[in-house]
Image (cartoon, rainbow, N blue to C red):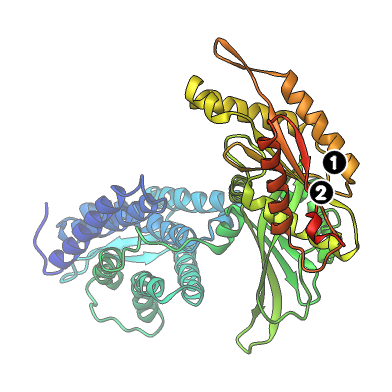
Amino acid sequence: MFEYTPYFLPIIASSLILFLLGIYSFRLRDKVEIAGLFALQNFAMGVWTLCYALELSSTTLEGKILWAKMKYLGSTTGPVLWFVFSLYYTNHKNWLSLPLKMLLGFFILFTIGVVFTNELHHWYWTKIFILPGFPESQSEHGFYFWVYAAGIYLLILASVIIYINYYRTVPVYFRRQSILLVWGTFLPLGIRILEDFVDWDPFPKVDNIILFLLISAVLYAIALFRYSALEIVPIAHSQVVQNINSGIIVLDALGRVVELNPFVQKLLGAESRTFIGKPLNEILTDGPKIKYSPHMLIQVEEEVSFVRNGGSEYFIAQVAPIRNERKNLLCHVISLVYMTERKYAEMELERLARTDMLTAITNRRHFFELAESQFALAQRYDHQLAIMMLDVDHFKSINDRYGHLAGDAVLQSVAQKCQSHMRSTDIFARYGGEEFIFLLPEQTEAGAVELAERLRQLLEQAEVKFEAWSLKVTASFGLALIQKESGLTLEQMIDRADQALYQSKRDGRNRITVWQLPSSEKG
């Protein structure tokens, strides 16, 4: 049998809110790791308050005893889940070791077992009775009640301390979440402490902690819906450092390694586990030389590379000083941002920028970049140097008769045959159209002419295969040698080689001409 009591409505309201919060949180469990845990916590608290409301409404002692026992299904698991949730929420779930899990599980099961078998031993209640005018059953407590109370106080106080410490380390937005969770957790406990130790009892006929669970439920609701306490949760810095796809090296004030994240450990190999306490230059003996000094006060950044598995891996190395609140230098952090793919992409773009796409040899722009320095060295130290120009004979006729693809095949063949006869110090490039250019350092006139003749004969004797045709190709050559004259430029030498080339064309093609100083200008 049940009867109405004025305390029934706020307690039922508290229970309803807690169950609704639990349902809402439970629906988020697939997206948010801690949502399922928070849901269980609210369900436990909801059971606690609902059973207490039914205890108040019961008209018989037997009914009150039944619901008093039933409420321990929630009042025992709720505080335990409070504590576990606080560890997960504040990124300390690693504290939840197997022995601690076993202890918490034993506490729940043993307490519920003691409560439901109380008639056999009276460890929890020595006597339960009804006082007129009091809707709640009255009791005299056995020794285990105080064990249970101490355990609950300890769990909730631990949760509050964890939240307060967490509050000090997170941005303002997350502090708002945590302060609501702290108050929601601590408020019922604080009321019970006041009731037990200073006899402050604002509602003497009922358990004050149950009534104040309504306020806890409201605070939890604000944390959930106003500050998205389950959806927007800060990630532990340690988890970021351990799992980030970049290297983190922490050095103390003396430049010794105090931390290497897994990315760096993998990069440095199996020996990395022995690197803690060693100076940076000792752990990078086979790696890049990172610009670092224990006295560095500014952030520096550079590109570095590690040789691994026969290839190079590229990183942006950033060295940053870390200071305390008083601006004193604490340590340095070196971050290694992986950029191998980007580096290879940049290298490929650079290669393409200096390469002729059709023939795969150096293009005209890059030729001038390379040739300027070689020309300057030859002039400064009075070294020999030759410029040679090559032009494919009757190239327009090939295009007109066989098509541009045939012309492309001819150019590719000429480039390949000439390239195979170059020294490592020679510079060979496509100059434009069907023209090619050579810069030949330390080459005499006789040597240059010999090379030109060898290439002329090679091209004359070769056949270019294109579809069903075998094309015969010849080429004309022009040569210019560096002269001991002041003011001579690379462009003038190239112009002289070009003049000689066109003289070969005028003289019947498939021949070599060496530029000579006009007789009118000779001494």
Label 1 SS: helix
Q: Quadrant of residue 479?
A: top right
Q: Residue furthest bottom?
A: 326
| Horizontal side of residue 347 vs 384, given as left or right | left
| Horizontal side of residue 517 vs 332, given as left or right | right
Label 2 SS: strand
Q: Which residue is mark 2?
A: 386
Q: Quadrant of residue 137?
A: bottom left
Label 2 crowd (10 A; few <14 / some 14-19 / many >=20) = many
Q: Quadrant of residue 96?
A: bottom right
Asked whether the beta carbons under mark 2 and mark 1 sit within 8 Å of each other, the answer is yes
Q: Which residue is mark 1?
A: 448
Kind of residue at disc 1: Ala
Q: Residue at x 70, y 34 (%)?
A: 507
Q: Can you give x and y, in whole percent of width and height, for residue 138 in the image?
A: 28, 66
Kind of residue at disc 2: Ala
Q: Quadrant of the C terminus?
A: bottom right
Q: Can you give x and y, in whole percent of width and height, for residue 133 in the image?
A: 15, 71
Q: Nearer the viewer, residue 124 or 176?
A: 176
Q: Residue furthest front?
A: 520
Sequence-first tag of 2 and 1:
2
Q: Residue at x 88, y 45 (%)?
A: 445
Relative to 229, is 496 above or below? above
Q: Residue at x 22, y 73 (%)?
A: 205
Q: Residue at x 60, y 51 (%)?
A: 346
Relative to 474, is 378 above or below? below
Task: Measure how far apart labels 2 and 1 are at the Cα level.
Answer: 7 Å
Q: Nearer the viewer, residue 222 or 457?
A: 457
Q: Can you give x and y, in whole percent of width and height, for residue 54 in the image?
A: 19, 56
